[in-house]
Image (cartoon, rainbow, N blue to C red):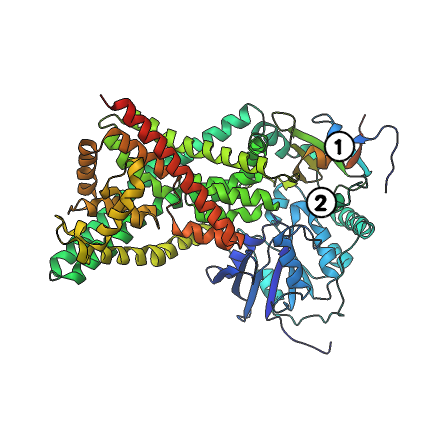
Amino acid sequence: MHDAALPQRIALLGNPNCGKTALFNLLTGSRQKVANYAGVTVERKEGVLRTMAGRRVAVLDLPGAYSLNAVSNDEAVTRDVITGHSQETLPDLLVCVADATNLRLHLRLVLEARRLGLPVVVALNKMDRALQLGIAVDKQRLARELNLPVVETVSIHAHGADELRALLDQPLQPCPPSHWRAPGIEQVMATQNDVLRIFQATVTSPSVDRDPSDRIDRFMMHPLWGFAVLGAVLFLTFLAVFSLGGWITGFIEEGTAWLGTTISATMAEGPLRGLLVDGVIGGVGGVLAFLPQILILFLFILALEASGYLPRAAFLLDRPMAAAGLSGRSFIPLLSSFACAIPGIMATRTITHWRDRLTTILIAPLMACSARIPVYTLLIAALFPHQPVAGALVMIGLYALGIVAAMTVAWVIKRADANHARSPLMMELPAYQWPDPRSIVIGLWERAMIFLRRVGTIILALTIVMWALYTIPSPRRTDEKTPIARSIAGEIGHALHYVFAPIGFNEEISIALVPGMAAREVVVSSLGTVYAMQGDEEQLDAQLTERIADEWPLAMKLSLLLWLVFAPQCLSTFVAVKRETGSWRQMWIMGGYLFGLAYLSSLITYQLTAFLTTP
Amino acid sequence: MRHARAETINLNELPELCWATVAGVTVPLDPADHGLVLRLVELGFVPGERVRVVREGHPGGEPLAIRVGHTTFALRRYEAAFIRVTPEG
């Protein structure tokens, strides 16, 4: 052994669903950095672990790959990083994570990794589950057959990676360099024969017929019961979002109102106080109020995904979604878009077929994200005062309208695409399991950060700009009555009013929609500002509801509701579409069609209602 | 790698819940499908493996939930048609 170097940079390689990310979370805890690989929208996760001797080692969590014969962006990134064809530093040790309950599938990647000319360690993951299922793995024999060190790991136990941590204090075994070339089908067959031989020599498992998973699947994917379960799961999820989420949101609103009052009481009257209280606290507080609803929806999505249920839901919905030109793979991104379109658009990365992915990105903003809930609630309360049942039905109707519109748009895109290629499915339905709480907490944290970064950047900046526009008077409008009508915002709203007049929006709405174009969350608070009202959030809502109920004609209320279902009022969504598609054109197509849809549906609604309600 | 015998059928023709043994894969006529077949082999659809259709999707029997070894995959009928199987008894 001429080189007794210790590993400094390791990379985790493994099949999707091998528990690699849970192991990564166990190894690194909260010490991880999430970004993208250079030039592609593939998530790059890096962290630092401590070995048993206390050394710090960098860990890269490579995207899950079934094979180095890449068919997806994820697999291409993994292949490029470990074959030295990327800007990444080559790791000095590959930890090949293999699910002990499914070695028949996962050993193949280990054999492929062995040919790379890098030191490899095999981590037999989910060993606890293998024991439960009566699967026995002869570790010594496996290490001998593979000629690689083999360690056992259990991602859900605090000490489950200690064997691996200890191994990382051992010097690296030198490895003859080699050049990786994509294997042909003959070589893949030969590798599979090796896998089968090693598998049969090292693993004893009870007959597949005894696996309960098939029986659960028969039920979960039953044409009748399967859909009933799916309906119940979605119903419970949204029930929690609305009831529990609304309850927590109440506390946040009270908190921000208290902060505003406290600052008002302690600071001297002046522009700085106005900026802090009305601008920053009002704006950011109003947006933070959605965080509970977003997080509850993601808690359900993450838990359902980790349990293995969501791929089954995607299986059930594959055929119905095919009618709209999509596949079951679009289900999870679209479900996420009900919380917020941005993580939804990011979740389309799992869709390997580019046209399907693009269609899903384009329709994701039509799913009613949580930022729409307060505006919907306000308008519905004004439309149907003291009629909670009618109000709830209209709310469900608005959600349904978004879904129907999305399916129609997807169908039109499919029809417009002349060389429409078959979209493949080939989706693993992983074994059912209990979700790992640590991974769910980390997943929730990551999504909360995506949202908070928006609040911290776009929405905060926007709130300050809007506050300035509302405060600075325009020299040409000195004869207007209210300060807002005299401001620059008033002038912009006045100009926009001509565009919005045919769809029934008055000057107040037009002004409120100016900031609302960049983030629809602020529509309610800007409407409040425009109507020159003071007071805390709750009071503001009640007053606004009354004024809208009294002063706006029915046609105007309906028209604004329809507008809010379709209009792309979210700058962050534009940014996300540009980033994920890498194309300005797609971004403008998304914005253009949504504006067109919003304007057209509001125009029809307004003109028709106005015509019918005119005595 | 093709052991086409009289009793082999394509996996998409296998009735629900009927166990079968993979006999081989069909070499696709369209070169665009080579990657697909290669991936099927990599996922474990290799001669000797036992497979069965756990559930057909509805409506139209699409897609298929197929059990192979300790894994279940959702495949389209088009994809399953490249896999030759011998039904058991």
- Identity of the residue drawn at 63% across and 65% down: A86
In the depicted view, which residue is nearer to us: A22 or A256?
Answer: A256
Q: 10 Å neighbourhood of mark 1: few (<14), some, or many (≥20)? A: many
Proximity of marks 1 and 2: CB atoms separated by less than 8 Å: no
Q: Looking at this view, is A139 or A507 the one in front?
A: A507
**Residue occupying the point 48% across, 62% down:** A33
Query: At which x and y percent is residue A459?
Result: 33, 54
Name the residue tied to disc 1: B11
Sequence order check: which comes first, mark 1 or mark 2? Answer: 1
Q: CA distance from mark 1 to mark 2?
A: 15 Å
Name the kind of residue labelled 1 in the image.
Answer: Leu
Taking the image as shown, residue A142 lies to the left or right of residue A288, namely right
Under mark 2, the amino acid is Leu
Along the line of sight, which residue is nearer the eye, A585 or B2? A585
In the picture shown, does residue B28 fall above or below A140?
above
Q: Is residue A284 left or right of residue B84?
A: left
Task: Tell me where residue A91 appears, x and y as whole percent.
Answer: 63, 67
Dot 2: element = loop
**Subunit ID for the residue under disc 2:** B
Q: Position of residue A332 (x, y in %)?
A: 51, 41
Q: Quadrant of the C terminus of chain A?
A: top left
Task: Label 1, secondary structure: give it.
Answer: helix
Mark carried by residue A505: none
Residue toward you, A52 or A515:
A515
At x 50% / y 45%, what residue is drawn?
A361
Residue that badge 2 annotates: B43
Q: Is residue B46 left or right of residue A334?
A: right
Q: Position of residue A434 (x, y in %)?
A: 52, 42
Q: Is residue A303 visible from the viewing direction of this image? A: no
For the image, the number of numbered tags is 2
Residue A498 seen anywhere in this rendered image of the structure: yes
